Amino acid sequence: MLKRLIFIITLTWIFIGNVNCQTKINTQKNVTNHFYNKALGISFDKIGRVIKHDSTNYSIDLFSNVSSNESAVVQISAANKLFVDLPGSYGGRLYLDSPSAAKLYKNILLVDSINTGRHNFKREYWAVYAGMGMWDCVINCYTYVKGKYYIVSLVQDEMMGKPGEINNGKRISSNELKSIILSSLQDKMNTNVNKFNDLLHSIRIQNK
């Protein structure tokens, strides 16, 4: 009887130890996989290594599952003015209230909104020709909280071809290329797009 009691007590302690260990591991995992900026009051799940550029700008490099020649980066920023990043075509940030922006509005393929359950983001799909067959392909999402615009974007450089080139005996137009790009940016099989959507849905902004 005594041996049986000791055996039961031993199993109980082993079980409790395993539960505590698993809880500790899960807690450490949650801490490791979540980013929080107290000054900005923003947090989000890490989908890669978070790179700090300054106190209001962060980025995460992604790897394409389609082509090694394509690069993709997620950018998370807080700003007083709206912008979209067009590194290849414009050379960097295009502020949407600048005179230069008016000429590039034709490159917005689609505008809609996405509700993450915590915040409602306006979403713009951009495709801007950068030359040599390369395009800036961007999903630019933003919301306004506490007097700041929180801008979350996926920026991809894609070799889609030059407008007017002959492809399979047919001249392909800029609008046809833009249609292909939009499909790519909405493709549920695109792992970079999926990672970006996961990050967007994980964002929490304190509004107090």
Image: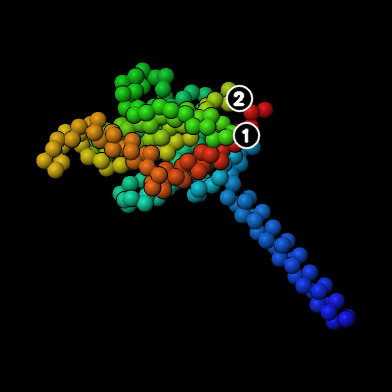
Q: Residues within 10 Å of mark 1 (few under 14, many from 20)?
A: few
The percent position of residue 41, horizontal first and vertical second, equals 62, 34
Q: Is residue 33 above or below residue 15?
A: above
* Residue found 54% across the figure and 25% down from its top: 144
Label 2 secondary element: loop
The span from disc 1 to disc 2 (Cα, nearest Å) is 10 Å
Indicate left or right for 40 with 199 as reference. right
Residue 194 in which image quadrant: top left
Which residue is label 2 attached to?
146
Nearer the observer, 180 or 31: 180
> Does any portion of residue 93 appear in the rendered image?
no
Could you tell me if the residues under marks 1 and 2 are in contact, i.e. CB atoms within 8 Å?
A: yes
Residue at the extreme left of the image, as rendered? 169
Q: Is residue 150 above or below residue 158?
A: above
Q: Amino acid at mark 2?
A: Lys
Which residue is label 1 attached to?
41
Residue at the extreme front of the image, as rendered? 1
Quadrant where the C terminus lies?
top right
Q: Is residue 50 above or below residue 99?
A: below
* Residue found 18% across the figure and 35% down from its top: 172
Nearer the observer, 44 or 197: 197
The percent position of residue 152, horizontal first and vertical second, equals 48, 35
Residue 35 in which image quadrant: top right
> Does any portion of residue 133 appear in the rendered image?
yes
Indicate left or right for 16 with 157 as reference. right
Q: Amino acid at mark 1?
A: Gly
Label 1 secondary element: loop
